[in-house]
């Protein structure tokens, strides 16, 4: 038997749609695997009732198949599904690591990224690697068509999770299909600023680089109370605020000593909008 802890992640970070991701120090899934004749899946924990245990419909079933590693897979969910915190990616990454070890497949963590990303396709319809990459490699990651770059970094974050779920599939429907040259230039500048900030563990630069006018506004419109929560976080000291992944979570970067205030301000703002929310005071993991 093998057991691994697979972290929540936040993808996009505003300016890096389908490319940037960061591992969060919490919450996390716990994935255990045992050899078996055929793959079976058992899910407990946060939102378990919404997760199919049929291996054909579950992200970890696709991973077990890709690794030719049938197993009884137990997932204790700490990362709620449809949260924007890489729930399916945490399970896929955890299963990939554990099965690779259990069956001695010998893949590196980098080589497991596309395998775990196949699991993502089962859930969202697209094999994007921006959540599985940080879940496997930690830190800040840049997932491109050519591979993955990762950077060790240490940036204080708050992830605020409203109760009302949003499916990645639905949130991908509102992504624009065209951008202007001006939008592209601004986005490249912001993405470069964010990357520099991550390399320097500089939360202020990261916050500036999170700005995005292409994907984030349409996504934010799906989240009840987003504008109030973002304004409250900024007022409480956040350097930057954006939609985490496909939402509904909202991610803020702030100075270390402002995390508690930012977390409380976001939760209160969502409550004013009739949304229960919980906030994780976290770090790049
Ligand atoms: N990059 C993906 C998206 C992440 O924003 O749709 C989903 O968590």
Image (spheres, rainbow, N blue to C red):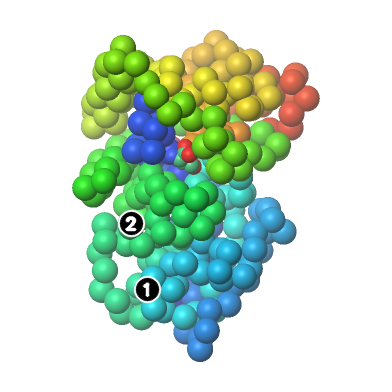
Query: Where residue 83 sits: x, y (%)?
Result: 59, 42
Residue bearing the label numbered 1: 67
Query: Where residue 61 sits: x, y (%)?
Result: 51, 69
Which element is circle 1 on? loop
Which element is circle 2 on? helix
Left or right of residue 9: residue 270: right
**Residues at marks 2 and 1, CA–CA distance in whole angstroms:** 12 Å
Front residue of 85/256: it is 85
Residue for point 64% across, 63% down: 52
Within 10 Å of disc 1 (Cα), the crowding (few <14, some 14-19, many 20+) is some
Q: Which mark is residue 159?
A: none
Residue bearing the label numbered 2: 113
Q: Earlier in the sequence, mark 2 or mark 1?
A: 1
| Residue closest to the far front | 178
User: Disc 1 beta carbon < 8 A from ligand 1?
Assistant: no
Within 10 Å of disc 2 (Cα), the crowding (few <14, some 14-19, many 20+) is many
Q: Quadrant of residue 58?
A: bottom right
Say if 100 sits above or below 139 in the image.
below
Query: Where residue 67 sits: x, y (%)?
Result: 37, 73
Query: Where residue 175 sits: x, y (%)?
Result: 49, 30
Quadrant, the C terminus: top left
Would you say residue 118 is visible in this rendering? yes
Residue for point 23% across, 44% down: 149
| Residue closest to the far right | 274
Residue for point 58% across, 64% down: 57
Residue for point 36% across, 80% down: 103
User: Do tag 2 and tag 1 residues touch (Cβ < 8 Å)?
Assistant: no
Front residue of 143/75: it is 143
Q: How many marks?
A: 2
| Residue closest to the far bottom | 37
Left or right of residue 139: residue 156: right
């Amino acid at each position: 038997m093998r057991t691994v802890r697979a972290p929540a992640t936040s993808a996009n970070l505003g300016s890096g749609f389908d490319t940037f991701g960061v591992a969060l120090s919490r919450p996390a899934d716990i994935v255990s695997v045992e050899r078996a004749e055929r793959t079976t899946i058992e899910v407990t924990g946060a939102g378990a009732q919404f997760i199919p245990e049929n291996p054909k419909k579950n992200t970890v079933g696709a991973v077990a198949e890709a690794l030719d590693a049938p197993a009884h897979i137990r997932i204790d969910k700490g990362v709620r599904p449809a949260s924007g915190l890489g729930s399916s990616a945490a399970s896929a990454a955890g299963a990939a690591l554990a099965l690779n070890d259990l069956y001695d497949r010998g893949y590196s963590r980098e080589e497991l990224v596309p395998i775990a990303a196949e699991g993502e396709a089962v859930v969202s319809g697209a094999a994007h690697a921006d959540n599985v990459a940080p879940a496997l490699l930690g830190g800040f990651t840049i997932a491109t068509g050519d591979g993955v770059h990762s950077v060790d970094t240490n940036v204080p974050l708050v992830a605020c999770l409203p109760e009302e779920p949003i499916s990645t599939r639905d949130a991908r429907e509102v992504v624009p299909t065209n951008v202007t040259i001006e939008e592209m230039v601004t986005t490249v500048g912001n993405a470069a600023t964010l990357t520099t900030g991550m390399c320097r563990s500089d939360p202020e630069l990261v916050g500036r680089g999170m700005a995005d006018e292409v994907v984030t506004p349409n996504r934010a419109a799906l989240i009840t109370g987003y504008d109030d929560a973002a304004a409250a976080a900024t007022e409480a000291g956040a350097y930057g605020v954006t939609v985490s992944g496909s939402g509904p979570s909202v991610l803020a970067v702030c100075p270390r000593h402002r995390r508690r205030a930012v977390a409380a301000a976001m939760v209160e703002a969502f409550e004013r909008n009739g949304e229960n929310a919980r906030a994780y005071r976290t770090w790049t993991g």
